[in-house]
Amino acid sequence: MGAKKELRVGIVGYGMMGRAHAYAYRAAPLIRPSSVVFTPVVMSGRNAEAVAKASEDCGIETWVTDWRQLIERSDVDVVDVCTPPGTHSAIIEAAALAGKDVFCEKPLATNYVDARSALDAVLASGIRHAIGFNYRRLPAVSLMAEMVASGELGEIHLWRGTWLSDEFVDPDITFDWRFDSMMGGSTICDLGSHLIDMAAWMLGPVNEVSAMSSTFVRTRDDAGRSRNVEVDDASSALVRFSSGAQGTMEVARAAPRRPCDFTIEVNGSKGTVMFAYAQLNELWVGNTDDDVRLYGLRRVRTEHPSQPETTGWWPIGQGVGYDASLINQVADLAATWEQRAWSPDFSDGANVAAVCSAMERSVFDRRWVSVDEIVHETPGQ
Ligand SMILES: NC(=O)c1ccc[n+]([C@@H]2O[C@H](COP(=O)([O-])OP(=O)(O)OC[C@H]3O[C@@H](n4cnc5c(N)ncnc54)[C@H](O)[C@@H]3O)[C@@H](O)[C@H]2O)c1
């Protein structure tokens, strides 16, 4: 057996995604063994007691209370950013200066200016960079992208994405970083970034957008004082792609009893393919070449070994879950580390941030906004 290349990871943040990434690093080699292995060696967080507990739970030896200390450590090869979006660009820029590879959770930033500055920093230093658009790694979503790319759906005309959650329904949820626009970003940025990434991955760049937003719970309690909520509870957008295709996107954290329900549908001149996260091991597919007696959409299982992102997973019929997207993400980073071919990377993250910023400007100005308008006015362009 050849020697494995071990890359030592510092995880910044010990919340949901810090723990989820720690889990994925541990599980990935069990599902898809690779000559490159990621080993989390340190975790950072501002609260000593909490980060000590999280790192112990995750089996990570060391913890620090400042992400700058984590980046400076000589035993850290890869910095994994799992903190709120408003912190990402500063952490990325420091990691790039230190010459460490960076893997960052989505969205790259809360606005295009910060996203562009994070991208410029990694391009200047020549490090590897990847962004956590993990849903691309679900077998069904990956198969959908393959079907679009293969041309079997014909010329793509329409795209439809929705993401409904009840995260902000309860008015008694107190103010935290998610309600702060500079730290959490909008719902467009939080949920929409995943949808926009999957859309651009499949259909190519978004050209222009027209959006509207609402905030239904306008103030929340912040340690005994009332604070204005700075982000949208829900937004809808019309989207025009450079290819000429058109689409619609709806994102909401104000939809009771809808837990992280997302759907994507693509209609081409010859066929339709539809994905719903609640049935994440399936696609619904129909094609004008199908026997007309079978008119309609049929359910396709996306667990067959011939389908993408299924390598190493359970026998067909057992299905996979959310964690498979994270485990496949790590396995793909390991598989492409040597070739310096990490994808999606911060260019993808910055492109998505430009679309999000265009949607936010459209809401504010009540007009169609081209993505170029956002990109070209940013310093360094
Ligand atoms: N890809 C996915 O499926 C997915 C799911 C959820 C969240 N996310 C993304 O992951 C990131 C983290 O989200 P989460 O749900 O883990 O959040 P969380 O609130 O559970 O954890 C956030 C972590 O960041 C730390 N933190 C908070 N403010 C900070 C600051 N100002 N400076 C430094 N550290 C700070 C917190 O102490 C905590 O350790 C966000 O970018 C979010 O959009 C991705």
Image (cartoon, helix red, strand yellow):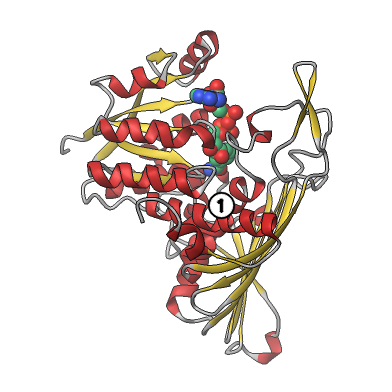
74 on left or right of 333: left
Q: Position of 356 compared to 160: left or right?
A: left
Seen from the viewer's position, the closer of residues 236 and 219 is 219
Q: In terms of image quarters, where does ligand 1 lie?
A: top right
Residue 116: x and y in percent read: 41, 48
Callout 1 crowding tier (Cα within 10 Å): few <14, some 14–19, many ≥20: many
What x and y, as percent, mark residue 258? 77, 48
For the residue labelled by badge 1, is the local secondary structure a helix, a strand or a loop?
helix
* View extreme (top): residue: 49
Pointer 1 residue: 193
Residue drawn 45% across the image and 57% down it: 377
Camera-nearest residue between 124 and 104: 124
* Residue plotted at (52% across, 46% down): 111
Viewer-proximal residue among 61 and 111: 111
Q: Amino acid at mark 1?
A: Ser
Q: Is residue 14 visible?
A: no
- Where residue 161 sits: x, y (%)? 65, 62
Mark 1 within 8 Å of ligand 1, using the beta carbon: yes
Residue 182 visible (yes or no): yes
Q: Is residue 148 left or right of residue 249?
A: left
